[in-house]
Amino acid sequence: MFDIFIFSAGSTMGGFHELCTESASIHHSANAKIASSVSSTKEINLTETAKPTIIPIKRKLTLEHRHKYPVSNGEILKFLTKKQTLSYLKKILNEKVKSQRHDIVCNMFRSGKLDFSMRSKIFQLTRADFLENDHKIDNQLLKTMSKVLEGVNLSKIPGMPANPAGSLVYQGPDNKNNYIWHVLVPEAIIKYLQEKNGWDKCNAEKFYLDGESRVTDEELKEFDEELEEDARRYQRQKLEDSYDSSEEDEWLDEHEDVDMDLPNIS
């Protein structure tokens, strides 16, 4: 979801999805298996003369999409409108709820050594690709999460006091955005996973960070079975097309000596 970067004083942060620019090479085996299977199905469909509607590519892409983005943008945005959600996130800000992400980011603000690069600990905890980039979600999240910061004493957070004179590092909106993307957004998603699935925070955290855990063995088996059924359907259609073509050739052979010219009526 956001540009990969190493922040230093004066740097500007992009949106949540821009962080995925350099993390595109990071794939999980379950999603790779699904993508590879779909790609192979497409290749078969393109290289043969069968009708394009034989293999329902759209259905397979929808299945892949569901595995890649198990939580929709709409679900998260709706969750963020709840008072309980905003209250929970404010407790993280006020350190009434323990958050490793909050501690890491605040320590960076305090020291002035900002590192949000792909190899940094905070980047690994952010999972910038968890939500789908529909080119609207970044602004929607920023607008919604900014409300969480309202009414909170930001002077407690290094780098974000109302009066920059009391801070070792002050970047104004940049630090606020960094905090939103790397602390509030991930913590909100994890809280949503807890409530939606009845999980404890440990399981929700694992699901959020581990893409492979999003796809169960049963789901993979079901997907494989669907691919096999499509392959059988494709072969049946191919045989039918071949049979129709043979009948046409046979008719032409039988009537090759027949004069098909129209009579001259002049």
Image: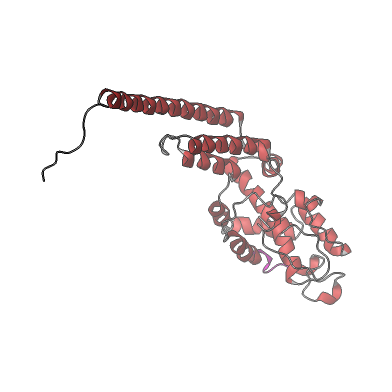
Residue 262, percent from left and from top: 17, 38
Residue 111, percent from left and from top: 88, 63
Nearer-the-camera pick, 122 or 19: 19
Residue 151 among those drawn in magenta: yes
**158 displayed left or right of 86:** right
Residue 119, percent from left and from top: 81, 50
Q: Main secondary structure of the magenta part?
A: loop
Q: Identify which residue is drawn at 65% across, 53% down.
A: 188
Nearer-the-camera pick, 6 or 45: 45
Q: Is residue 64 above or below residue 192?
A: above
Nearer-the-camera pick, 184 or 252: 252
**What's drawn in magenta, residue-wise?**
148-153
Quarter of the image with the N terminus is bottom right
Q: Residue furthest left?
A: 265
**243 displayed left or right of 78:** left
Based on the displayed image, in which of its 4 quarters is residue 146 positioned? bottom right
Residue 8, percent from left and from top: 83, 65
Residue 257 among those drawn in magenta: no
Q: Is residue 190 above or below residue 4?
A: above
Based on the displayed image, in which of its 4 quarters is residue 112 positioned? bottom right
Q: Is residue 212 above or below residue 224?
A: below
